[in-house]
Image (cartoon, rainbow, N blue to C red):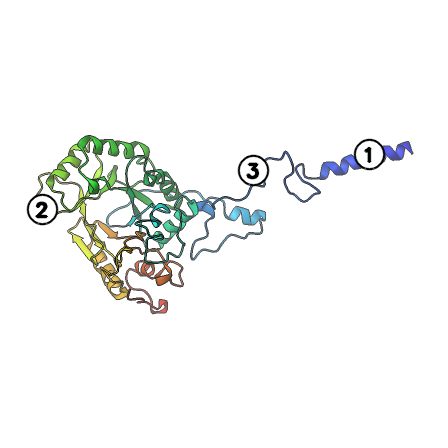
Amino acid sequence: MKKLFVFATLLGLLLAGCAPANSIGGTGLAGPGANPTAAAPQGPVSPSQTAVPGLQAADPAGSTQATSAVQPATPPAMPGLSFPIRAAFYYPWFPQSWNQQGMNPFTHYHPSLGFYSQDEPAIIAQQIAAMQYGKIQLGIASWWGQGHYTDARFPALLKAGEQAGFYWVAYIESEGQGNPSVAAIRSDLQYIHDKYASSPAYLKIGGRFVIFVYADPNDRCGMVDRWTQANTLGAYLVLKVFSGYKACASQPDGWHQYAPDGSIKSVGISSFTISPGFFKASEAQLRLARDLHQWDAAIHAMIASKADFQLITTFNEWGEGTAVESASEWASPSGYGQYLDALHYDGNPPVSLGLPGPGT
């Protein structure tokens, strides 16, 4: 009997040693005292695991093979871009800007991703994939200054850009709200240079980090003087045009126009800008109706211009209704929407897509 008891005891210990160390009843569920991260609820999907339109989602079965399929790939090489560069103005304003002027959501349209938050890495990853589908190489991200929520989101844009081989630059908005001093401008340039420009996803031209600058319609040559004087770091400056800009003694590296209530805007060899439409949330009347025939023609003109920066206003300024990002109003079988479909095909979409589409 004693031998039998010893044998049974040894057998019990042997079987216990075969069970998972942190399991309850062999179910694999984390038990008391187990590492809380082992069975913690899933957070936002990482960019490397994001399901994007046109891409097959990973197998949810949890097998080793399925898990390895969604591991981050080696980041693509980012040797830089050469002219012409196709770029889109991008707004890291959400969810804050869905709620404006007593309206929520502040838009006439219904984005296919919903009324999203750009604090979620998966959203940024899907937006980059959408821009790349439209042959957009560069995002010009609205930046409202040090410590603003647009500044807080910039590292996530760069991280996602490094993973996807996509470039970013800052679109400094301060000039549209006043006349920042040379010292204030220099501080912002130094901040962007030190904090962001070292990323391979931050665009450099000839080794110089690129900055786009918005401007007030009433700005004159004094604005250019302030920016060129402040630019002791050698940033590649692309300023917004104003009346008489060509006659200024000081000149930046390039000029652009931001006026999305017009279909096309040409600024010589510096830039050529196209807009799909303009319908501000707080206005009852369209300023620029959406028309895919017109959009295709604008794309053709943009490409034919051979301008250095070939600009789209905008990827996702939903408040002004200028977005090319997919919405239910212009959704398409590709998952990216009719306006990005047209950009993908350089204004020559195949008949099978059923374009052109809506008139508004």
Where residue 252 appears, x then y in whole percent? 16, 40
Q: Which residue is mark 2?
A: 244
Q: Amino acid at mark 2?
A: Gly
Specify whether 329 is left or right of 85: right
Instruction: Say which quarter of the image contains residue 240.
Output: top left
Q: Which residue is mark 1?
A: 9
Where residue 153 appears, x then y in whole percent? 36, 40
Specify whether 52 is left or right of 178: right
Does dot 1 land on a helix, a strand or a loop?
Answer: helix
Q: Which residue is mark 3?
A: 37
Q: Is disc 2 in contact with disc 3, using a CB cutoff of under 8 Å?
A: no
Specify whether 117 is left or right of 360: right
Where residue 344 appears, x then y in whole percent? 32, 58
> Separation of disc 3 and disc 1 at Cα?
34 Å
Does dot 2 land on a helix, a strand or a loop?
Answer: loop
Q: Amino acid at mark 3?
A: Thr
Image position of 175 with respect to 331: above or below = above
Taking depth in this image into account, of 198 and 248 the one nearest to the observer is 248
